[in-house]
């Protein structure tokens, strides 16, 4: 379980953004963890919006705050579009996750700093567990750092 103290010690902000297809899941995660240092970057409407705009907004916010002091969560219908856009930024390692193991490995092996979730394909309880694992898991370094350096 995540705690307010542990999150605030590790991160200045957890930026979160979604398009219309990810809005319900985004609202659920914020409501489930109201003590997290969230910074909601939109959307706040169920009207159709363009996911690249929100991914870009989140990446710029992480850059301004300092990527090492923050984490990001992006949610769209499949999660894939957000991941593609976010990974265009050199300091971002966005990982599309679909289960607990993928979230854990994204942190341990890839030092991912943005969790991308498929809002149309993920049940709330599963998203909660992926978020918890993503935020609690540390990067393993070692041979994995050599690989990250090649990115």
Image (cartoon, rainbow, N blue to C red):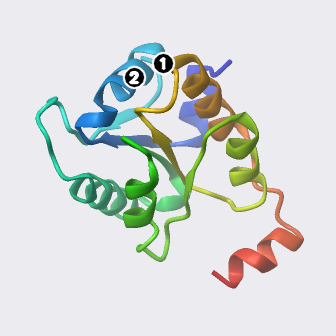
Please state the horizontal and vertical placement of residue 65, each as a whole percent of the image: 38, 57
Q: Which mark is residue 91?
A: none
117 w.r.t. 32: above or below: below
Displayed quadrant of residue 80: bottom left
Displayed quadrant of residue 37: top left
Please report contact status of discs 1 and 2: CB closer than 8 Å, yes or no.
Answer: yes
The answer for how far apart the CA atoms under marks 1 and 2 are is: 5 Å
Foreground of the two, 66 or 97: 97
Please state the horizontal and vertical placement of residue 122, each as a whole percent of the image: 51, 29
78 w.r.t. 56: above or below: above
Q: Which residue is mark 2?
A: 30
Specify whether 50 is left or right of 55: left
Which residue is the extreme one toward the bottom?
150
Please state the horizontal and vertical placement of residue 39, each as a whole percent of the image: 33, 37
15 w.r.t. 65: above or below: above
Mark 1 burial class by Cα count in 10 Å: few <14, some 14-19, many 20+: some
123 w.r.t. 113: above or below: above
Mark 2 burial class by Cα count in 10 Å: few <14, some 14-19, many 20+: some
Q: Quadrant of the N terminus?
A: top right
Identified at 15% across, 46% down, the residue is 49
Disc 2 on helix, strand or loop?
helix
Disc 1 on helix, strand or loop?
loop
Please state the horizontal and vertical placement of residue 57, each as a whole percent of the image: 26, 56
Q: Which residue is mark 1?
A: 33
Specify whether 7 is left or right of 29: right
Foreground of the two, 80 or 2: 80
Foreground of the two, 42 or 83: 83
Q: Quadrant of the C terminus?
A: bottom right
Identified at 58% across, 17% down, the residue is 125
Foreground of the two, 148 or 102: 102
């Amino acid at each position: 379980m995540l705690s307010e103290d542990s999150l605030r010690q590790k991160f200045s902000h957890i930026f979160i953004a979604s398009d219309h297809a990810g809005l319900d899941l985004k609202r659920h995660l914020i409501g489930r963890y109201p003590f997290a240092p969230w910074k909601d970057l939109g959307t706040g409407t169920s009207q159709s919006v363009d996911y690249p705009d929100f991914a870009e907004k989140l990446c710029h916010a992480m850059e301004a705050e300092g990527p090492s002091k923050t984490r990001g969560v992006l949610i769209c219908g499949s999660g894939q579009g957000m991941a593609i856009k976010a990974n265009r930024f050199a300091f971002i390692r966005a990982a599309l996750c679909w289960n607990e193991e993928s979230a854990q490995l994204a942190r341990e092996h890839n030092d991912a700093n943005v969790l991308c979730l498929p809002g149309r394909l993920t049940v709330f309880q599963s998203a909660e567990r992926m978020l918890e694992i993503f935020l609690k898991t540390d990067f393993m370094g070692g041979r994995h750092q050599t690989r990250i350096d090649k990115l």
